[in-house]
Amino acid sequence: MGRREFLRIAGGIGASLAVPALSGCSDADDALTFFFQANPDEADGRQRVIDEFARRYPDIRVRTLLSGPDPMQQMLTFCAGGKCPDVLMAWEQTYAGLADRGVLLDLNTMLERDPSFAAELGADSVTALYDTFRFKGGQYALPEQWSGNFLFYNRKLFDEAGLRAPGCWDDAWSFAEFLDICQALTERERSGRVGQWGFADTWVPYYSAGLFAINNGAEWTSPRTVPDRTTFADDAFIEGVQFYADLATRHEVAPTPADQQSISTMDLFTQGKAALAMGGHWRYQTFAAAEELDFDITALPVGPNGHGARSNIGTTGLAISADSPRKEQAWEFLKFAAGPAGQAVVAESGLFVPAGKSAVRSRGFAGAHSDIENLNILVEGPARSAPLPVTASWARIDALMDRYLGPVLRGTRPATSLKNRLAPEADEVLRNQ
């Protein structure tokens, strides 16, 4: 996994913390090792879960291992050398490669031995998140959080313009209405320079374009798990991508890729220079800390071929190393962190959107987001999310998307070019996986 792949992952869960490389585990160390990636705030949130686990399970010590900038390579290196951490953070788009290599334990073996917890987890889990970590019949991780995308909007700018944002997923704008809103909220100075953008994207642009396509009724692949074809050549996908690209290159209501070389889309929103910003909950703490920024959240717009507003399933989970000598202790940690008790701690921290239905609907989660009126966007977000493909070959598809969607987003090629470029090459990758 190269730097570009890492940046994509970081865009889905937050920026990485620059820390020393993971160190191996001594055979004499009886502590349960937990490998994860996090920025300082996220690390603090995870520590709260660990501290509560330690209080309830004093006989199981947990040693945290923060990753450096290339977590996948670190995991492969240490597991190949017999020093694999006991508990591993799993990403929705890369875990399948580890499962395919035999690095991760199939948790079905643990769930079958623990039917009461399996039933409790099944009742509290959002099916779409849980199923994200199913691969070739195995369950390789338990979801711990949801990191899908939606829209942040500046209440002050909307109020001044006399505009209203939808408060729930069922009341989303159409593509045409969204364009009208962005045009109304884009302001230019006498020189022609944009002083206020209608829309700014804080995610990874070629994935954002794909998500607009999903909201136009497309899917990423068929089938979802171990797919044999993409939908990149389908009209609904192409039209959604073109609409997203046109926001910047044709309608000039969003910064172009060239603009983004000199300006931060995050700063545009925090400084009140963008009325709408696309991103996930990982942006919440940054926006909440911005002085004089009064914001709320709303759903993404729906295209003419869409069937309701959707987000994407961005999620991380917890997995157990197949070679862990502490599988029983690791299972107790997973049960706590991904179960109702640990999810309640996550909810109260406000740093993540919990994966558990009871936690995301709890008073603790609402209290941690008391400034958000449209909390339903977060509460229903996981169930409203379109699944990303589960395949060990996704890193290669990701590289192709970056290569062929780039010219479309820069306005040098139309989205119809994906039919003869991206689609056939991506399909070939899937056929040969």
Image (cartoon, helix red, strand yellow):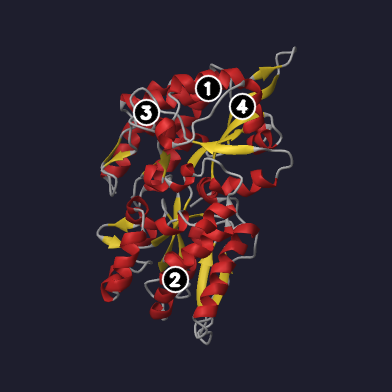
- Camera-side mark, 2 or 4: 4
In three-dimensional space, the C-alpha distance between marks 3 and 4, rounded to whole angstroms, equals 25 Å
Is residue 49 found left or right of 259 in the rendered image? left
Q: Residues within 10 Å of mark 1 (few under 14, many from 20)?
A: many
Q: Residues within 10 Å of mark 3 (few under 14, many from 20)?
A: many
Helix, strand or loop at mark 2: helix
Which mark sits nearer the N-terminus, 4 or 1?
Answer: 4
- Camera-side mark, 4 or 1: 4
Q: Which residue is situated farthest in the front direction here? A: 363
Q: State the residue at coordinates (57%, 73%).
A: 51
In three-dimensional space, the C-alpha distance between marks 3 and 1, rounded to whole angstroms, equals 15 Å
Give the residue at mark 4. Answer: 158
x, y percent for residue 296: 58, 38
Which mark sits nearer the N-terminus, 2 or 3?
Answer: 3
Give the residue at mark 1. Answer: 247
Return the mark for residue 336: 2
In three-dimensional space, the C-alpha distance between marks 2 and 3, rounded to whole angstroms, equals 38 Å
Q: Dots 2 and 3: beta carbons under 8 Å? A: no
Q: State the residue at coordinates (36%, 53%).
A: 126
